[in-house]
Image: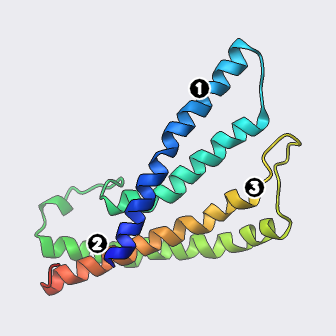
């Protein structure tokens, strides 16, 4: 499990550098559009692709470092054992079913996109729409893997075998 989590953390750290790339590309789009009256569809699509890649691959990383959005009015005051049970419950009842539904419903959509190597609807757009849509499968897969890590760690905590 530690290798799975360390891989997710490694990926999240690498993907986080795309934020700098995203800011720079957006900066260039604004400069070229408003100062030089130049516009490229492929560059705007690159911003969309990059944003999607950051969000969909870093979600599992965010979960692994416990920085996801949550409301822990009661959770914060619970003993560690009960917190572990709440985490296990959350993974079983919310996270894994969400991941399963997301993967199941995205599969035909992604499969169809790959079957035609879908391109941008704009002639000057990026050709790899099928790659962008593949993120719809990577996202729930990585989240489910991180859920497995959380479930395992919580189970160990409940059993009292920390480590």
**What label does residue 129 carry, if any?**
3
The percent position of residue 138, horizontal first and vertical second, equals 57, 67
Q: Quadrant of residue 35?
A: top right
Q: Give the residue at mark 1.
A: 27
Q: Give the residue at mark 2.
A: 87
The percent position of residue 40, horizontal first and vertical second, equals 78, 31
Residue 94 visible somewhere in the drawing: no
- Quadrant showing the N terminus: bottom left
SS for tag 1?
A: helix
The percent position of residue 140, horizontal first and vertical second, equals 53, 69
Left or right of residue 7, residue 139 in this image: right
Q: Nearer the viewer, residue 116 or 88?
A: 116
The percent position of residue 105, horizontal first and vertical second, equals 66, 72
- Quadrant showing the C terminus: bottom left
Of mark 1 and mark 3, the one earlier in the sequence is: 1
SS for tag 2?
A: helix
Q: Is residue 3 above or below residue 118?
A: below
Residue 153 visible somewhere in the drawing: yes
- How far apart marks 1 and 3 lie (CA) works out to 23 Å
Crowding at mark 1 (Cα within 10 Å: few <14, some 14-19, many 20+): few
Left or right of residue 128, residue 155 in this image: left
Left or right of residue 110, residue 91 in this image: left
Q: Are marks 1 and 3 in contact (CB under 8 Å)?
A: no
SS for tag 3?
A: helix
- How far apart marks 3 and 2 lie (CA) works out to 36 Å
């Amino acid at each position: 499990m530690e290798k799975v989590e360390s891989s997710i953390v490694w990926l999240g750290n690498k993907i986080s550098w795309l934020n700098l790339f995203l800011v720079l590309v957006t900066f260039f789009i604004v400069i070229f559009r408003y100062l030089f009256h130049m516009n490229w569809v492929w560059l705007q699509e690159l911003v969309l692709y990059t944003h999607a890649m950051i969000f969909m691959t870093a979600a599992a990383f965010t979960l692994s470092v416990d920085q996801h959005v949550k409301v822990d009015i009661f959770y914060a005051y619970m003993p560690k054992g009960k917190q572990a049970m709440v985490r296990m419950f959350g993974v079983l009842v919310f996270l894994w079913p969400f991941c399963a539904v997301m993967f199941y419903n995205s599969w035909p959509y992604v499969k169809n996109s790959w079957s035609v190597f879908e391109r941008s609807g704009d002639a000057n757009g990026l050709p790899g729409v099928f790659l962008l849509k593949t993120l719809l499968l990577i996202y729930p897969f990585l989240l489910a893997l991180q859920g497995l890590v959380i479930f395992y760690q919580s189970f160990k905590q409940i059993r009292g075998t920390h480590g």
